[in-house]
Amino acid sequence: MARLMNDNLARRPGLWVVVLVASVIVAGSTAYYRWSAAQNPTPSQYSLDRNVESAAGKNAASSDSRTEAGRAQNIEQTAKPANLTPEQKRQLHDVLARAPQARRSGDDLPLTLGAAVPQQVALADLPTDASDILHGYSGDKYVMVGDQLVIVDAQARRVVALIQGIS
């Protein structure tokens, strides 16, 4: 096979140029993709650890963006790990245990930052005490999926935080 390929390349010198250019394009594209993925983690990369929040969702009112797509993009672009201490998680558990809860199996709920939450998904008001523990999310909604707290922007109905370990 290699001999046949070398014979074809020897008879057609222009084919070497095509092979070389194609190799450079493939190598460059692969290197750029890997570099850009490392520089800009996607929401799904953050969502893998299931402890993530959006600075835009935490601190800004949902009316700050002019479009629904703009709001989703703003939430996704400001993603960061949610660093809660075990004590804060315990406090959240205690607060949510006393509050009216919305629970889901999670099969029909998108568990990624910025994802739209369908209207048919029942949400509960996030208690003020929970907002205080989280230092934000005042006026937002939530739903529990297993031991995961999913905080949803009340107006835009977009996921703004995912916090695991709140059983």
Image (cartoon, rainbow, N blue to C red):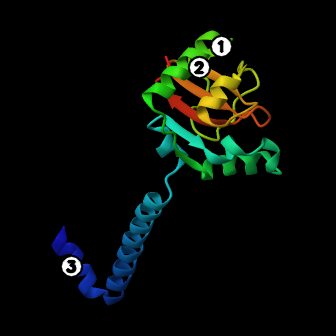
- Quadrant of residue 151 in the image? top right
Element type where label 3 sits in the image = helix
Which of discs 3 and 2 lies nearer the camera? The answer is 2
Identify residue type, mark 3: Asn
Element type where label 2 sits in the image = strand
How far across and how far down the image is residue 116, in percent?
69, 35
How far across and how far down the image is residue 2, in percent?
18, 71
Q: In this figure, which residue is indicated by the disc labeled 2?
A: 144
In this view, 97 is above or below 68? above
Identify residue type, mark 1: Gln
Quick check: marks 2 and 1 in contact, CB under 8 Å?
yes
Q: Which mark is residue 156?
A: none
Residue at 59% x, 11% y: name it: 97
Q: Earlier in the sequence, mark 2 or mark 1?
A: 1
Q: CA distance from mark 2 to mark 1?
A: 7 Å
- The reply to whether residue 126 is in sight is no
Identify residue type, mark 2: Met
Which of discs 1 and 3 lies nearer the camera? The answer is 1
In this view, 103 is above or below 66? above
Q: In this figure, which residue is indicated by the disc labeled 3?
A: 6
- Of residues 165 and 76, the one drawn nearer to the viewer in this rendering: 165
Q: In this figure, which residue is indicated by the disc labeled 1?
A: 101
